[in-house]
Amino acid sequence: MELKQFDGQSKDELAMVDVAHAILEQTGQVTNYNDLLMQVAEYLNIDDNELEAEMIQFYTDLNIDGRFISLGSNRWGLRSWYPIDSIDEEITHDNDEEDEKPRRRNRKGFDDEIEVFEDDDVEEDDDVVEFGDRVAVDEHGVMVDDEDDEDLGEYKADLEDLGDDDEEDDENIAGLSVVDDEDVLGDDEEEEE
């Protein structure tokens, strides 16, 4: 393969990525990475050992160089071939979400198309609190809701039941007295002196 851009230049001084650009520009076709690598190696007369050592750097250069675009499945082309808007279309072959319509099965097992309407008038919950609205709070600064009072009723009853057990425990330890930490620490310090 002859590349007119490099007439008169030494092949030893050419970068692999520049040769790849010239090859893609001349052929005008999307090319598989391995095929492109072999064409570059053939043009530059690179032997297998040197090619194996350089192929990783060549792949990195293709990714970094803004003139190239990866089109998936290890296929490469020139970015200049694609208008900006069509790049995503070429790269992704998946159907758009808009193209796919949800389907449901009727009683006989056949698919029925369902029309999907996007409703801007979504029903909003009346209990939604907007920023800046005034709300009721308890003594701890926690927002109070009517449903909370019902839920807390059972919790408060459980706490009261627990409190009754504490009174029974207090009666069992009647002969003991409470001592402050300072009193205990003060006694230990005096003993050390």
Image (cartoon, helix red, strand yellow):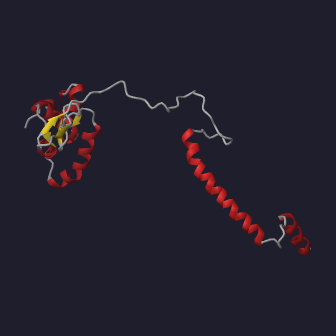
Q: Position of residue 54 (x, y in %)?
A: 23, 49
In the image shown, does 53 or 170 lie closer to the viewer? 170
Rendering coords of residue 33 (x, y %): 16, 44
The location of residue 189, given as percent across then percent down, is 88, 70
Q: Is residue 11 left or right of residue 160?
A: left
Residue at screen point 61% across, 57% down? 158
Whether residue 41 is situated above or below residue 166 in the rendered picture: above
Where is residue 31? Give x, y as percent: 13, 39
Work out whether residue 66 can be spotted.
yes
User: Closer to the camera, 117 or 99?
Assistant: 117
Asked whether, in this view, residue 31 is left or right of residue 59, the answer is left
Q: Quadrant of the C terminus?
A: bottom right
Residue 1 location, quadrant: top left
Observer able to see residue 8 = no
In the rendered view, tell whether residue 188 sits above or below residue 122: below
Residue depicted at x 18% and y 33%: 90
Task: Work out whether residue 114 or residue 47 is closer to the camera in this orientation and state it.
Answer: 114
Vertical relation: 7 (above or below) 53: above
Q: Which residue of the protein is positioned furthest toward the bottom in this rendering?
A: 191
In the foreground, 149 or 189: 149
